[in-house]
Image: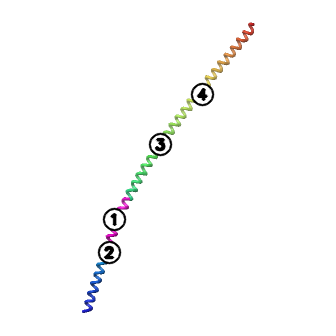
């Protein structure tokens, strides 16, 4: 009978130990589930932030391309303006050179005519 009581007491302790282990397991499982949910939320937030960063990076790339195109266009316009200015300067220089040549020719002609008049006047005397 004593053995039966001892066996019954051992079974009671084993049952209590088993229930305690189950309770600890359930507590650990709940804690793990909470941790998994928190990690999932953190991962989702991180992914959203990453997507925002990616979108922002794409926007920056687009802006860089736009600015590059604007700079190329402005640079071409400046080159064209400089080329036009150089052409105009060249044309003005050509015009001035022709005018100077014309004036020089007129001066030379006038000097020759003056010399001829002086010769004729000198011959008349």
Which label is found at residue 25? 2
Labelled disc at residue 37: 1
In the picture provided, is 50 more to the left or to the right than 106? left
Q: Quadrant of residue 32?
A: bottom left
Q: Label 3: state its secondary structure.
A: helix
Which numbered disc flags the more N-terminal residue, 3 or 4?
3
Categorize mark 3 by other alpha carbons within 10 Å: few (<14), some (14-19), many (20+). Answer: few
Residue for point 64% across, 22% down: 101
**Residue that badge 4 annotates:** 93
Of the image marks 4 and 2, the number of the one nearer the N terminus = 2
Residue 28 magenta: yes
Mark 4 to mark 1 CA distance (whole Å)? 82 Å
For the N terminus, give its image quadrant.
bottom left
- Viewer-nearest residue: 109 or 28: 28
Q: Nearer the viewer, mark 3 or mark 2?
A: 2
For the record, the magenta segment spans: 21-45
């Amino acid at each position: 009978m004593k053995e039966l009581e001892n066996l019954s007491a051992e079974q009671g302790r084993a049952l209590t130990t088993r229930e305690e282990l189950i309770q600890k397991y359930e507590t650990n499982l709940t804690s793990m589930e909470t941790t998994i949910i928190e990690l999932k939320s953190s991962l989702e937030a991180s992914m959203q932030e990453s997507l925002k960063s990616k979108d922002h990076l794409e926007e920056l790339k687009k802006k860089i391309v736009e600015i590059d195109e604007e700079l190329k266009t402005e640079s071409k316009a400046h080159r064209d303006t400089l080329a036009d200015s150089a052409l105009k300067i060249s044309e003005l220089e050509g015009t001035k050179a022709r005018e100077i040549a014309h004036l020089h020719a007129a001066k030379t002609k006038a000097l020759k005519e003056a010399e001829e008049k002086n010769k004729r006047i000198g011959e008349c005397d």
